Amino acid sequence: MKRIDFLQKALLAAGGLTAGALSSARAGNPEVIPNPLPPADPEALNIFELEQVAKEKLPTIAYDYYRSGAWDEVTLKSNRESYEKLKIHYRVLVDVADRDLSTTVFGQKISFPIMVAPTAFHKLAHPDGELATARAAVNTGTIMTLSSLSTTTIEEVAAATNKNFWFQLYINKNREYTRDLVARAESAGAKALVVTVDTPMWGRRERDVRNGFHLPPGLSAINLVKYDKDAVAKGQTGAGLGQSFAWMLDATLQWKDMDWLAGITKLPIIIKGVCRADDARIALQHGVKGIVVSNHGGRQMDSAPATIDVLPSIVDAVGNDLTVLMDGGIRRGLDAMKAIAQGAKAVLVGRPVLWGLAAGGQVGVEKALTILRTELDLAMALSGCRNVREINRNLLG
Ligand SMILES: Cc1cc2nc3c(=O)[nH]c(=O)nc-3n(C[C@H](O)[C@H](O)[C@H](O)COP(=O)(O)O)c2cc1C
């Protein structure tokens, strides 16, 4: 979309100018009086518009890397579409003047139940990279999960968050490397370990293959370079993520490796990438304390089900024993409300944060998180929920 069209769309969405007024204004009609209260920031009223701002700022190779899904992007699409099928059977005549969005995850209080999902390479979006994201998470009262594939060190993010962050782990074939990385995250002050389990190999994202995705000179998966002397060079070959970063995964990973991991860390282990109730039940026997119902934002197994569709069966299977979180396709506070109604303790957002980061660094991420928080708050008021405990399946009819 051209910039002028986008701004017009944003203004229309904000009610700032009607379509008729816009065309009259274009025709130079002097009687058109612009709305005296234009929106404070007409560029992005919601996450979709924030994505458009990000798209204009980002080089294609980075925008495509962030937005893409695997193969035909069927799961990427259904992650979104499935929210629309859920209807909110709102309650009336409840005093909702005071609302409390806070909740607690693994003993940490967050001011609203939306957290930052681990996403790679934040310096591709903005020079301040993960530090901008980390500070925005702190300022909005939530938790960032730092990716193993970050472009900022674990220690810097620990300092920026006053040790209030989680660390996402890709388990490497070389268990000594993995042990070292876990020890490093733990001693830096991470409060939980999010182990990604939907990546025996990288999903094939054809946009990245076509664009020859690579990191520009100066950027690397900085926490991992010490484990492979060729890591920096591999990241810049242009062979796409599937080849350039294949060395950091382990296709032999099994449940027994979760036992091994539980034996080398005191941090709570949360496995991320579960989409089946039977897998969630197996997790109970392997030292796991939580799960993120996730299909990696549609980037791994294409045609995996939408996370909001499988969430209820997983909550029913393990909700009393494990903390169940979820991610995938959340673009409105209302989507978060639907996930919480289905039993998620909290949700995580990936791309919305990246769009905010690309659009405006720390301020942009704060904006993305605040948009989602404000939308959730309004959705709660409009449906008669005074706190997150009152968001339950009863709302879904
Ligand atoms: C650009 C990008 C990079 C990602 N990098 C990682 C990663 O390094 N580790 C990981 O566990 N998940 C990663 N994910 C998956 C996210 O943690 C999360 O599951 C997904 O983005 C949620 O979907 P959403 O983007 O629709 O919110 C990535 C996702 C995107 C879009």
Image: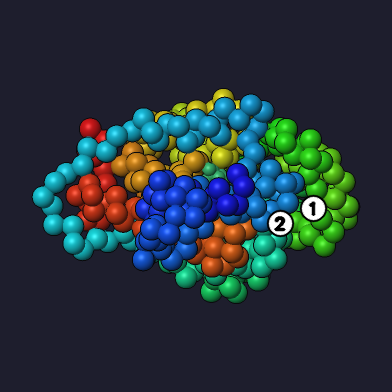
Q: Is mark 1 within 8 Å of ligand 1?
A: no
Disc 2 crowd, CA 10 A, few/some/many (<14, 14-19, 20+): many
Q: Is residue 79 visible?
A: yes
Number of numbered discs: 2
Q: Are marks 2 and 1 in contact (CB under 8 Å)?
A: yes
Secondary structure of the residue carrying tag 1 is loop
Residue 296, position as x, y percentages in the image = 58, 40
Q: Which residue is mark 1?
A: 215
Residue at 11% from the left image edge and 50% from the top image edge: 93
Q: Is mark 2 within 8 Å of ligand 1?
A: no
Q: In which quadrant is the C terminus drawn?
A: top left
Q: Earlier in the sequence, mark 2 or mark 1?
A: 2
**How far separated are the C-alphas under marks 2 and 1?**
8 Å
**What's under tag 2, amino acid-wise?**
Leu
Instruction: Using the image as rendered, state which of residue 245 and residue 85 is in the foreground.
Output: 85
Residue 392, position as x, y percentages in the image = 26, 43
Residue 50, position as x, y percentages in the image = 53, 53
Residue at 47% from the left image edge and 63% from the top image edge: 41
Up the image or down, 353 lies above or below 184; here it is: above
Residue 44, position as x, y percentages in the image = 49, 56
**What's under tag 1, amino acid-wise?**
Leu
Q: Which residue is mark 2?
A: 124
Secondary structure of the residue carrying tag 2 is helix
Disc 1 crowd, CA 10 A, few/some/many (<14, 14-19, 20+): many
Q: Quadrant of residue 302?
A: top right
Residue at 33% from the left image edge and 33% from the top image edge: 86
